[in-house]
Image (spheres, helix red, strand yellow):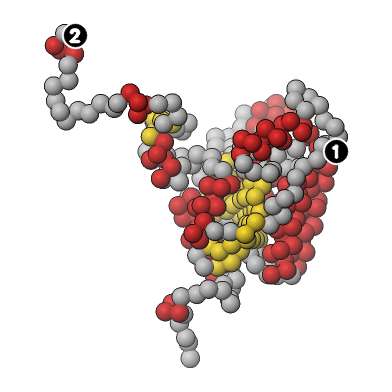
Amino acid sequence: MAEWFRRKSEKIKTLDKREIAEGMWVKCPQCQEVVYRQMLEENHFICTSCTHHFRITSDDYIQLLMDDGEYEEIAGNVQSVDPLNFNAAKNYIDQIRTAQEKTGNKDAVKTIAGEINGLKAVLAIMDFTFIGGSMGSVVGEKISQAIDRATKDMLPLIIITASGGARMQEGAYSLMQMAKISSKLARYSDMGGLYITVITDPTTGGTTASFAMLGDIILAEPNALIGFAGARVIKQTIGEDLPEGFQRSEFLLEKGFIDHIVGRKELKTTLSDLFSFFNFGKGMKKNEDEVEIIE
Ligand SMILES: [Zn+2]
Protein backbone atom coordinates (compact mmCIF):
# COMPACT_ATOMS: atom_id res chain seq x y z
CA MET A 1 0.00 0.00 0.00
CA ALA A 2 1.29 3.45 -0.83
CA GLU A 3 2.52 5.53 2.07
CA TRP A 4 -0.18 8.21 1.82
CA PHE A 5 -2.94 5.69 2.59
CA ARG A 6 -1.49 4.92 5.97
CA ARG A 7 -3.01 6.60 8.99
CA LYS A 8 -0.21 8.39 10.80
CA SER A 9 -2.07 10.08 13.58
CA GLU A 10 -2.78 7.95 16.62
CA LYS A 11 -5.65 10.28 17.52
CA ILE A 12 -7.81 9.10 14.66
CA LYS A 13 -9.36 5.84 15.67
CA THR A 14 -10.74 3.31 13.28
CA LEU A 15 -13.21 0.68 14.31
CA ASP A 16 -12.31 -2.93 14.11
CA LYS A 17 -14.32 -4.61 11.35
CA ARG A 18 -15.73 -7.09 13.85
CA GLU A 19 -17.36 -4.17 15.70
CA ILE A 20 -19.31 -3.15 12.63
CA ALA A 21 -21.20 -6.41 12.57
CA GLU A 22 -24.70 -6.22 11.21
CA GLY A 23 -27.30 -4.74 13.52
CA MET A 24 -24.83 -2.79 15.63
CA TRP A 25 -25.67 0.48 13.92
CA VAL A 26 -29.08 1.94 13.41
CA LYS A 27 -30.00 4.72 11.02
CA CYS A 28 -32.36 7.27 12.51
CA PRO A 29 -35.36 7.70 10.18
CA GLN A 30 -35.75 11.33 11.27
CA CYS A 31 -32.27 12.88 11.12
CA GLN A 32 -30.58 10.11 9.05
CA GLU A 33 -27.78 9.96 11.60
CA VAL A 34 -26.22 6.53 12.05
CA VAL A 35 -26.30 5.72 15.76
CA TYR A 36 -24.51 2.98 17.68
CA ARG A 37 -27.20 0.52 18.84
CA GLN A 38 -25.82 0.18 22.35
CA MET A 39 -25.91 3.96 22.85
CA LEU A 40 -29.47 3.98 21.59
CA GLU A 41 -30.45 1.22 24.01
CA GLU A 42 -28.89 3.04 26.94
CA ASN A 43 -30.87 6.13 25.91
CA HIS A 44 -34.23 4.24 25.96
CA PHE A 45 -34.19 4.11 22.15
CA ILE A 46 -34.28 7.89 21.79
CA CYS A 47 -31.98 9.17 19.02
CA THR A 48 -28.94 10.79 20.62
CA SER A 49 -28.76 13.49 17.97
CA CYS A 50 -32.41 14.49 17.33
CA THR A 51 -34.46 12.86 20.16
CA HIS A 52 -36.53 10.80 17.70
CA HIS A 53 -38.36 8.11 19.70
CA PHE A 54 -37.83 4.70 18.08
CA ARG A 55 -40.59 2.14 18.55
CA ILE A 56 -40.00 -0.14 21.52
CA THR A 57 -41.59 -3.36 22.75
CA SER A 58 -43.91 -3.97 25.71
CA ASP A 59 -40.98 -5.49 27.61
CA ASP A 60 -38.96 -2.31 27.05
CA TYR A 61 -41.80 -0.27 28.57
CA ILE A 62 -41.90 -2.63 31.55
CA GLN A 63 -38.17 -2.06 32.11
CA LEU A 64 -38.66 1.69 31.69
CA LEU A 65 -41.61 2.09 34.07
CA MET A 66 -41.86 -0.66 36.67
CA ASP A 67 -39.87 -0.41 39.89
CA ASP A 68 -36.96 -2.89 39.65
CA GLY A 69 -38.60 -4.24 36.46
CA GLU A 70 -40.95 -6.28 38.70
CA TYR A 71 -44.58 -7.00 37.93
CA GLU A 72 -47.42 -9.48 38.26
CA GLU A 73 -48.99 -10.59 35.01
CA ILE A 74 -52.79 -10.40 34.60
CA ALA A 75 -54.54 -12.92 32.32
CA GLY A 76 -51.17 -14.16 31.09
CA ASN A 77 -52.49 -17.41 29.66
CA VAL A 78 -55.23 -16.12 27.37
CA GLN A 79 -54.45 -17.25 23.82
CA SER A 80 -56.11 -16.66 20.50
CA VAL A 81 -58.22 -19.18 18.65
CA ASP A 82 -59.08 -18.96 14.95
CA PRO A 83 -62.83 -18.27 14.96
CA LEU A 84 -63.16 -17.72 11.21
CA ASN A 85 -60.73 -20.41 10.10
CA PHE A 86 -58.98 -17.57 8.35
CA ASN A 87 -56.75 -18.33 5.38
CA ALA A 88 -54.91 -15.70 3.38
CA ALA A 89 -51.28 -15.73 2.22
CA LYS A 90 -50.63 -17.37 5.60
CA ASN A 91 -53.18 -19.06 7.76
CA TYR A 92 -53.99 -17.23 10.96
CA ILE A 93 -52.89 -19.92 13.43
CA ASP A 94 -49.43 -20.07 11.79
CA GLN A 95 -49.21 -16.31 11.88
CA ILE A 96 -49.93 -16.26 15.61
CA ARG A 97 -47.40 -19.01 16.25
CA THR A 98 -44.71 -17.15 14.31
CA ALA A 99 -45.46 -13.91 16.18
CA GLN A 100 -45.35 -15.74 19.53
CA GLU A 101 -41.97 -17.24 18.71
CA LYS A 102 -40.60 -13.93 17.45
CA THR A 103 -41.75 -11.83 20.40
CA GLY A 104 -41.92 -14.32 23.27
CA ASN A 105 -45.41 -12.94 24.03
CA LYS A 106 -48.80 -14.64 23.75
CA ASP A 107 -50.50 -11.76 21.94
CA ALA A 108 -50.26 -8.05 21.12
CA VAL A 109 -50.77 -6.76 24.66
CA LYS A 110 -49.16 -7.37 28.00
CA THR A 111 -51.35 -6.74 31.04
CA ILE A 112 -49.67 -6.31 34.39
CA ALA A 113 -49.91 -4.88 37.90
CA GLY A 114 -46.96 -3.41 39.72
CA GLU A 115 -45.45 -0.32 41.24
CA ILE A 116 -44.34 2.90 39.57
CA ASN A 117 -42.17 4.97 41.91
CA GLY A 118 -43.73 3.10 44.82
CA LEU A 119 -47.33 3.61 43.66
CA LYS A 120 -49.41 0.62 42.62
CA ALA A 121 -51.02 0.61 39.17
CA VAL A 122 -52.46 -1.64 36.48
CA LEU A 123 -50.97 -1.40 32.99
CA ALA A 124 -51.87 -2.73 29.57
CA ILE A 125 -48.99 -2.33 27.14
CA MET A 126 -49.55 -3.01 23.46
CA ASP A 127 -46.78 -4.35 21.26
CA PHE A 128 -46.55 -3.34 17.61
CA THR A 129 -44.11 -6.17 16.86
CA PHE A 130 -46.94 -8.71 17.41
CA ILE A 131 -49.00 -8.68 14.15
CA GLY A 132 -48.86 -4.88 14.05
CA GLY A 133 -50.33 -4.49 17.54
CA SER A 134 -53.65 -5.52 16.08
CA MET A 135 -56.66 -5.74 18.39
CA GLY A 136 -58.28 -9.16 18.39
CA SER A 137 -60.37 -10.98 20.97
CA VAL A 138 -57.33 -11.79 23.13
CA VAL A 139 -56.27 -8.15 23.29
CA GLY A 140 -59.88 -7.30 24.19
CA GLU A 141 -60.12 -9.97 26.88
CA LYS A 142 -56.76 -9.17 28.46
CA ILE A 143 -57.44 -5.43 28.58
CA SER A 144 -60.92 -6.16 30.03
CA GLN A 145 -59.43 -8.30 32.79
CA ALA A 146 -56.87 -5.58 33.52
CA ILE A 147 -59.69 -3.02 33.82
CA ASP A 148 -61.58 -5.41 36.15
CA ARG A 149 -58.51 -5.65 38.35
CA ALA A 150 -58.08 -1.86 38.42
CA THR A 151 -61.78 -1.50 39.29
CA LYS A 152 -61.67 -4.13 42.05
CA ASP A 153 -58.58 -2.71 43.76
CA MET A 154 -59.25 0.93 42.73
CA LEU A 155 -55.85 1.34 41.17
CA PRO A 156 -54.90 3.79 38.41
CA LEU A 157 -55.07 2.25 34.94
CA ILE A 158 -52.62 2.99 32.16
CA ILE A 159 -52.92 1.75 28.61
CA ILE A 160 -49.90 2.27 26.37
CA THR A 161 -51.13 1.98 22.80
CA ALA A 162 -49.27 0.91 19.63
CA SER A 163 -51.63 -0.57 17.10
CA GLY A 164 -52.59 -0.81 13.46
CA GLY A 165 -56.22 -1.23 14.54
CA ALA A 166 -58.62 -4.16 14.50
CA ARG A 167 -57.27 -7.62 13.64
CA MET A 168 -58.91 -8.38 10.32
CA GLN A 169 -58.21 -12.11 10.66
CA GLU A 170 -60.90 -12.20 13.36
CA GLY A 171 -63.44 -10.15 11.43
CA ALA A 172 -66.35 -8.81 13.46
CA TYR A 173 -64.98 -10.40 16.66
CA SER A 174 -62.16 -7.87 16.64
CA LEU A 175 -64.56 -4.96 16.16
CA MET A 176 -66.60 -6.12 19.18
CA GLN A 177 -63.55 -5.53 21.39
CA MET A 178 -63.98 -1.78 20.98
CA ALA A 179 -67.40 -1.95 22.66
CA LYS A 180 -66.29 -4.52 25.24
CA ILE A 181 -63.32 -2.44 26.41
CA SER A 182 -65.23 0.86 26.24
CA SER A 183 -68.08 -0.43 28.42
CA LYS A 184 -65.62 -1.74 31.03
CA LEU A 185 -63.89 1.64 31.01
CA ALA A 186 -67.22 3.40 31.56
CA ARG A 187 -67.87 1.27 34.65
CA TYR A 188 -64.34 1.91 35.95
CA SER A 189 -64.88 5.62 35.42
CA ASP A 190 -68.22 5.57 37.27
CA MET A 191 -66.46 3.95 40.22
CA GLY A 192 -64.02 6.86 40.33
CA GLY A 193 -61.04 5.32 38.54
CA LEU A 194 -58.15 7.19 36.95
CA TYR A 195 -57.50 6.15 33.37
CA ILE A 196 -54.41 7.45 31.57
CA THR A 197 -53.55 6.60 27.96
CA VAL A 198 -50.04 6.85 26.59
CA ILE A 199 -50.25 6.89 22.81
CA THR A 200 -47.12 5.78 21.02
CA ASP A 201 -46.10 5.47 17.37
CA PRO A 202 -48.19 4.29 15.54
CA THR A 203 -51.73 4.17 16.94
CA THR A 204 -54.44 3.93 14.32
CA GLY A 205 -57.80 2.40 13.35
CA GLY A 206 -60.11 0.86 15.93
CA THR A 207 -57.64 1.41 18.78
CA THR A 208 -57.68 5.17 18.21
CA ALA A 209 -61.45 5.00 17.68
CA SER A 210 -62.01 3.46 21.10
CA PHE A 211 -59.86 3.18 24.21
CA ALA A 212 -56.84 5.26 23.07
CA MET A 213 -59.03 8.36 23.01
CA LEU A 214 -61.05 7.59 26.15
CA GLY A 215 -58.39 8.42 28.74
CA ASP A 216 -59.17 10.86 31.53
CA ILE A 217 -55.72 12.09 30.62
CA ILE A 218 -54.32 11.43 27.17
CA LEU A 219 -50.54 11.52 26.88
CA ALA A 220 -48.55 10.89 23.72
CA GLU A 221 -44.92 10.31 22.84
CA PRO A 222 -43.30 12.97 20.60
CA ASN A 223 -44.00 12.75 16.87
CA ALA A 224 -46.17 9.62 17.18
CA LEU A 225 -48.47 8.82 14.27
CA ILE A 226 -52.01 8.93 15.66
CA GLY A 227 -55.07 8.63 13.47
CA PHE A 228 -58.02 6.58 12.36
CA ALA A 229 -57.70 6.20 8.57
CA GLY A 230 -54.39 6.58 6.74
CA ALA A 231 -53.37 9.99 5.38
CA ARG A 232 -53.46 8.75 1.77
CA VAL A 233 -57.06 7.53 2.09
CA ILE A 234 -58.17 10.83 3.63
CA LYS A 235 -56.38 12.82 0.94
CA GLN A 236 -58.08 10.83 -1.80
CA THR A 237 -61.48 11.11 -0.13
CA ILE A 238 -61.50 14.85 0.48
CA GLY A 239 -59.42 15.66 -2.60
CA GLU A 240 -57.25 18.15 -0.75
CA ASP A 241 -53.66 18.34 0.45
CA LEU A 242 -53.28 17.66 4.15
CA PRO A 243 -51.61 20.17 6.48
CA GLU A 244 -48.00 19.78 7.57
CA GLY A 245 -47.55 17.41 10.50
CA PHE A 246 -51.04 15.96 10.05
CA GLN A 247 -51.77 13.00 12.41
CA ARG A 248 -48.68 13.61 14.54
CA SER A 249 -48.74 14.16 18.32
CA GLU A 250 -47.78 17.84 18.11
CA PHE A 251 -50.56 18.57 15.58
CA LEU A 252 -53.13 16.73 17.70
CA LEU A 253 -52.02 18.56 20.85
CA GLU A 254 -52.58 21.87 19.05
CA LYS A 255 -56.08 20.72 18.01
CA GLY A 256 -56.95 19.59 21.54
CA PHE A 257 -57.14 15.84 20.95
CA ILE A 258 -54.39 15.04 23.42
CA ASP A 259 -53.44 16.66 26.72
CA HIS A 260 -49.68 16.48 26.85
CA ILE A 261 -46.63 15.20 24.97
CA VAL A 262 -44.22 13.32 27.21
CA GLY A 263 -40.72 12.24 26.30
CA ARG A 264 -39.88 8.67 27.24
CA LYS A 265 -37.36 9.74 29.88
CA GLU A 266 -40.00 11.77 31.74
CA LEU A 267 -42.79 9.19 31.43
CA LYS A 268 -42.28 7.34 34.70
CA THR A 269 -42.16 10.50 36.83
CA THR A 270 -45.09 12.04 34.94
CA LEU A 271 -47.24 8.98 35.66
CA SER A 272 -46.41 8.75 39.35
CA ASP A 273 -46.91 12.53 39.73
CA LEU A 274 -50.37 12.16 38.19
CA PHE A 275 -51.25 9.29 40.55
CA SER A 276 -50.27 11.44 43.52
CA PHE A 277 -52.03 14.52 42.18
CA PHE A 278 -55.28 12.58 41.83
CA ASN A 279 -54.79 11.05 45.25
CA PHE A 280 -54.07 7.52 44.08
CA GLY A 281 -51.01 7.12 46.27
CA LYS A 282 -52.94 6.58 49.48
CA GLY A 283 -52.11 3.50 51.50
CA MET A 284 -49.18 2.72 49.22
CA LYS A 285 -45.50 2.46 49.98
CA LYS A 286 -44.22 5.89 50.90
CA ASN A 287 -40.97 7.28 52.18
CA GLU A 288 -41.74 8.46 55.73
CA ASP A 289 -39.36 11.42 55.43
CA GLU A 290 -41.32 12.79 52.52
CA VAL A 291 -44.66 12.83 54.30
CA GLU A 292 -45.47 16.31 55.51
CA ILE A 293 -47.83 16.61 58.43
CA ILE A 294 -49.95 19.73 58.34
CA GLU A 295 -51.54 20.68 61.65
ZN1 LIG B 1 -32.22 11.20 14.89
Q: From the viewer's perspective, is 107 left or right of 291?
A: right
- Residue depicted at 40% across the width and 26% down the height: 21
Q: Residue 118: horizontal and vertical position, in percent?
A: 52, 68
Residue 11 in view of the camera: yes
Q: Which residue is mark 1?
A: 83
- Viewer-nearest residue: 60 or 31: 60
Q: What is the secondary structure assignment of the residue under circle 2?
A: loop
Q: Residues within 10 Å of mark 1 (few under 14, many from 20)?
A: few
**Residue 1 shows which numbered tag?**
2
Mark 2 surroundings: few (<14), some (14-19) or many (≥20) residues within 10 A: few
Q: State which quadrant residue 112 falls in.
A: bottom right
Residue type marked 2: Met
73 above or below 203?
below
Nearer-the-camera pick, 97 or 126? 97
Image quadrant where residue 18 sits? top left
Task: State the residue lying farthest toward the top.
Answer: 2
Q: Position of residue 105 (x, y in %)?
A: 64, 43
* Corner quadrant of residue 134: top right
**Where is the N terminus found, in terms of image quarters?**
top left
Q: Residue 166's x, y, as percent?
A: 75, 39
Residue 278 position within the rendered picture, expressed as x and y whole percent measured from the top left: 59, 70
Q: Amino acid at mark 1?
A: Pro
Provide the secondary structure element on which disc 1 rests: loop
Image label count? 2
Residue at image position (15%, 12%) is 4
Horizontal side of 174 relative to 281 (left or right) equals right
